[in-house]
Image: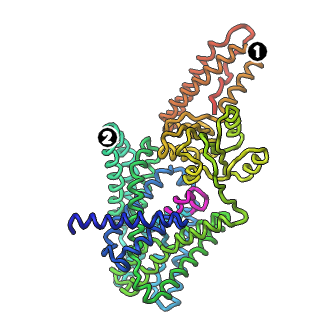
């Protein structure tokens, strides 16, 4: 194909996306469904503008890889460890029960057991791309249902190697034994990724960053993702799993924000292209030839998986809303089913007719998921026990996210100076209480981009982040810094841990108990007879010392030994600093064995 033909094809993809996605977003149907139906329209079975969807599908799968890398960058190993119950328990049960149910049903319908088993393996998989993209689009990935969905999708990627071994065993003419080579190769590659991320990648990132050339850092970011993808693919693992692991291992790197900013635009375009390619792969003539069987099987699979997933989620203590989200997000059959069925066709386990029918069922199930998310969103808005987000009808120079005891003090001072504020809180009972006292407060999650835009963040001068969720506060800061860099931010920090995160973003946070603790320390000194002037000087000295100590600790915060050493030297430095303030025979002094003043939380 000549170069102009490539440009024509690229123009077709971009036109389809630009026309369909804004339309579907405006209709409230979501961007994923827009991409999918745009692909159906331009594919070889409709307008025939694109003849070979398979070629672009393999290329566009890299968008899924980038998505998992960015998700990994948002997590740290201890956060992944927190998901172990959902990862192993919920994920393992979902895969095993779905495989067993579909296999049993296939045998009952008269299929040979190897064919039924292959069908079951494919149907047990869910779409990482559609599930995660739909959750991210709605800002639901950090909810309990979103986290459970992510854990199960991760388990499905982990199950790739054993499932491929099962495929090899049921293939015609397969031997009973199976070499341990692929498993050892996979373990070797994972060990190399873990080692290289700590010993090679980070020093290389520093060298590349020191060049000061943004395009070289972008090139290095893409090379990193491509290199990991090729390594894990050679080992027979899921590319998405390998790049997710690389993202997790780099989550505490000082360059993770730069990595995210560099990869995010490419990820969005490639992920959209992936959805378009999936839409083009829908065999419309086959669906039209036997619509009852194809659509019926797709609906049955989606309904059965949703029911199973909901039951498992409730058994694992998710509430009704979380279980419903979990069931909707993973009810489709995933893109990995295409790989499984193609491999089974090559091995001779599936014939061509069965292969075409299964692929059609998979594609149709993917098309159903965005529609289910639309119904889920409507149901959430209509549910009597779930409150819809308020529409914000004003724009003010200051937006305050979180109107609890911390935010209220800030707002009272600003209002006393005649500065108008827009108040947002995500606790419905708190909103109702403050409204009774005459405050105009809106109910909603201020971390959602659409709500911030509705509040006029693009034209605001200041955002006060006063919410009591440290992770969400840091995420909000990062989003606003990236999208609206001109907006000033004042952020509340619960303690030193999230204060470090804010400092790395170039922000000086307000630690919520720091100043009140200093005031209490001053009262204690005065009660023990220290003169007011000396007390004020001591408190100023302590505050300055603690801020310097916070910055020194931030630079080595991932080295526990270094943190302990700085804390120890800080205690001695502080004692030496403040001992000079003790004067007069009646002044209380620290005797041997007495503890020096502690650093602030």
- With respect to residue 257, does 335 lie above or below? below
Q: Is residue 497 visible?
A: no
**Mark 1 against mark 2, which lies toward the viewer?**
2
Q: Is residue 145 magenta?
A: yes
**436 or 376, nearer to the observer:** 436
Question: Label for residue 529?
Answer: 1
Tell me which label, 1 or 2, sits earlier in the chain. Answer: 2
Name the residue that disc number 2 marks.
Answer: 213
> Count of labels shown?
2
Q: Is residue 503 visible?
A: yes
Percent across and percent down for residue 63 are: 39, 61
**326 or 118, nearer to the observer:** 326
- Label 2 Cα crowd, 10 Å radius (few <14 / some 14-19 / many 20+): few
Q: Quadrant of residue 170?
A: bottom left
Contact between labelled residues 2 and 1, with CB atoms less than 8 Å apart: no
Q: Quadrant of residue 54?
A: bottom left
Quadrant occupied by the N terminus: bottom left
Percent across and percent down for residue 336 are: 42, 71
- With respect to residue 553, does 240 lie above or below? below
Quadrant occupied by the C terminus: top right
Percent across and percent down for residue 483 are: 48, 46
Residue drawn where x is 56% and y is 29% of the image: 567
- Label 1 Cα crowd, 10 Å radius (few <14 / some 14-19 / many 20+): few
**Principal secondary structure, stretch drawn in magenta:** helix
The stretch in magenta equals 133-148
Q: Quadrant of residue 457?
A: top right
């Amino acid at each position: 194909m000549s170069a102009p033909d490539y440009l024509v094809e690229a123009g077709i993809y971009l036109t389809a996306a630009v026309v369909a996605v804004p339309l579907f977003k405006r209709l409230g149907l979501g961007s994923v469904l827009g991409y999918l139906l745009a692909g159906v329209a331009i594919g070889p079975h409709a307008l025939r503008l694109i003849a070979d969807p398979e070629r672009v599908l393999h290329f566009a799968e890299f968008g899924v890889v980038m998505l998992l890398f960015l998700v990994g960058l948002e997590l740290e190993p201890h956060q992944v460890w927190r998901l172990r119950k959902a990862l192993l328990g919920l994920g393992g049960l979902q895969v095993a029960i779905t495989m067993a149910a579909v296999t049993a049903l296939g045998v009952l319908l008269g299929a040979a057991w190897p064919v039924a088993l292959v069908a079951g393996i494919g149907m047990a998989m869910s779409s990482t791309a559609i599930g995660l993209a739909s959750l991210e689009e709605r800002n639901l990935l950090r909810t309990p249902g979103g986290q459970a969905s992510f854990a199960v999708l991760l388990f499905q990627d982990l199950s790739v190697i054993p499932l491929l071994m099962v495929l090899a065993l049921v293939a015609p003419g397969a031997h009973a034994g199976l070499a341990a080579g692929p498993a050892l190769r996979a373990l070797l590659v994972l060990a190399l990724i873990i080692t290289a991320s700590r010993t090679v990648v980070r020093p290389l990132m520093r060298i590349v960053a020191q060049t000061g050339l943004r395009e070289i850092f972008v090139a290095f970011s893409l090379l990193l993702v491509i290199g990991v993808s090729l390594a894990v693919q050679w080992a027979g693992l899921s590319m998405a799993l390998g790049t997710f692991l690389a993202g997790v291992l780099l989550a505490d790197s000082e360059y993770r924000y730069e990595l995210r900013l560099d990869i995010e635009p490419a990820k969005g375009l490639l992920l959209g292209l992936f959805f378009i390619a999936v839409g083009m792969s829908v065999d419309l003539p086959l669906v039209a030839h036997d619509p009852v069987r194809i659509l019926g099987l797709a609906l049955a699979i989606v309904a059965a998986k949703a029911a199973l997933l909901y039951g498992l989620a409730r058994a694992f203590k998710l509430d009704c809303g979380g279980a419903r989200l979990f069931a909707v997000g993973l009810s489709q059959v995933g893109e990995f089913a295409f790989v499984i069925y193609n491999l089974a066709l090559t091995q001779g386990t599936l014939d061509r007719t069965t292969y075409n029918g299964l692929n059609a069922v998979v594609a149709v199930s993917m098309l159903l998921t965005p529609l289910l998310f639309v119904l889920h969103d409507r149901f959430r808005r209509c549910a009597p026990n779930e409150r819809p987000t308020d529409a914000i009808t004003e724009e003010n120079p200051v937006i305050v996210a979180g109107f609890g005891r911390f935010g209220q003090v800030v707002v009272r001072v600003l209002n006393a100076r005649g500065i108008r504020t827009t108040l947002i809180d995500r606790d419905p009972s708190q909103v109702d209480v403050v409204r009774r006292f005459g405050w105009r407060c809106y109910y909603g999650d201020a971390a959602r981009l659409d709500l911030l835009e509705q509040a006029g963040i693009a034209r605001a001068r200041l955002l006060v982040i006063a919410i009591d969720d440290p992770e969400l506060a840091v995420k909000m800061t990062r989003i606003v810094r990236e999208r609206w860099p001109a907006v000033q931010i004042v952020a509340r920090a619960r303690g030193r841990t999230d204060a470090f995160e804010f400092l790395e973003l170039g922000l000086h946070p307000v630690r919520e108990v720091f100043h009140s603790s200093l005031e209490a320390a001053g009262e204690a000194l005065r009660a023990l007879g220290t003169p007011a002037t000396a007390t004020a000087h001591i408190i100023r000295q302590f505050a300055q010392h603690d801020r310097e100590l916070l910055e020194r600790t931030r630079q080595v915060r991932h080295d526990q030994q270094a943190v302990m050493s700085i804390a120890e030297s800080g205690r001695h430095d502080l004692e030496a600093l403040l001992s000079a303030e003790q004067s007069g025979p009646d002044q209380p002094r620290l005797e041997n064995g007495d503890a020096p003043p502690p650093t602030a939380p």
